[in-house]
Amino acid sequence: MTTTIVRNPSALDALARGLERDSGPDYDLSRWPADVTEIVRETCRLWKLHPPCDRSRKAKWILDARSLADACGEFGVAVLQEYRESFVAFMVAHNGVAFHTVSGPGSLVNMVCDQARQMREKEEHDDPKRYITGEFSAFIHH
């Protein structure tokens, strides 16, 4: 394969363009709506995706990113990061097989909504106000 790239300058140029495009998560999202840039940037960073350039796919991603932002709720992108950890743990436990494919923000809406629910339940469970203390604690039978 190395000799093919050396002999074919167009293949070398294509490889250089691909490496340049994959060099970092700093995509130009300046023309995207402000309410979705953080979600799109984090989705692309965590799942190694590229935001679309054509209008129709970009419009779909914007709608999906807004749905994903609603699913994240009060936790924001922290839910995406936590779901990514469970996603990777599932892949490790199942020999690299993913639970589902991720092709954009729309692929994550239901799973991230469930992850946010789990985070809310954990917060409620860890809340010290939930436990009865003081004079009423004597009436609780263990």
Image (cartoon, rainbow, N blue to C red):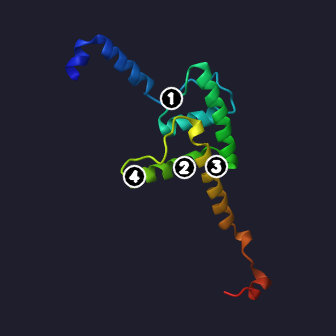
Comes first in the chain, label 4 or label 2? 2
Q: From the viewer's perspective, is residue 82 above or below residue 136?
A: above
Instruction: Answer whether labels 4 and 2 touch (C-beta < 8 Å).
Output: no
Of 42 and 110, nearer the camera is: 110
Residue beneath label 4, please?
A: 92
Residue 125 horizontal side relative to residue 95, left or right:
right
- The local crowd at label 2, few if under 14, some if 14 to 19, many if 20 or more residues have their Cα within 10 Å, is many
Q: Secondary structure at mark 1?
A: loop
Kind of residue sitting beneath label 3: Cys
Discs 2, 3 touching: Cβ within 8 Å: no
Q: Amino acid at mark 1?
A: His
Contact between labelled residues 4 and 1, with CB atoms less than 8 Å apart: no
Q: Which mark is first along the chain, 3 or 2?
A: 2
Specify whether 43 is left or right of 23. right
Q: Is residue 69 left or right of residue 44?
A: right
Q: Residue at coordinates 56% horizontally, 23% vertically from top-left? A: 28
Residue 70: percent from the left, percent from the top?
Answer: 69, 42
Looking at the image, tell me whether mark 4 or mark 3 is earlier in sequence order. 4
Which residue is labeled 3 in the image? 113
Q: Earlier in the sequence, mark 3 or mark 1?
A: 1
Q: Secondary structure at mark 3?
A: helix
What's the CA distance linking mark 4 and mark 2? 14 Å
Q: Judging from the image, what secondary structure is the residue with disc 4 in?
A: helix
Mark 1 or 4 closer to N-term?
1
* Residue bearing mark 2: 83
Residue marked by disc 1? 50
Q: CA distance from mark 3 to mark 1?
A: 23 Å
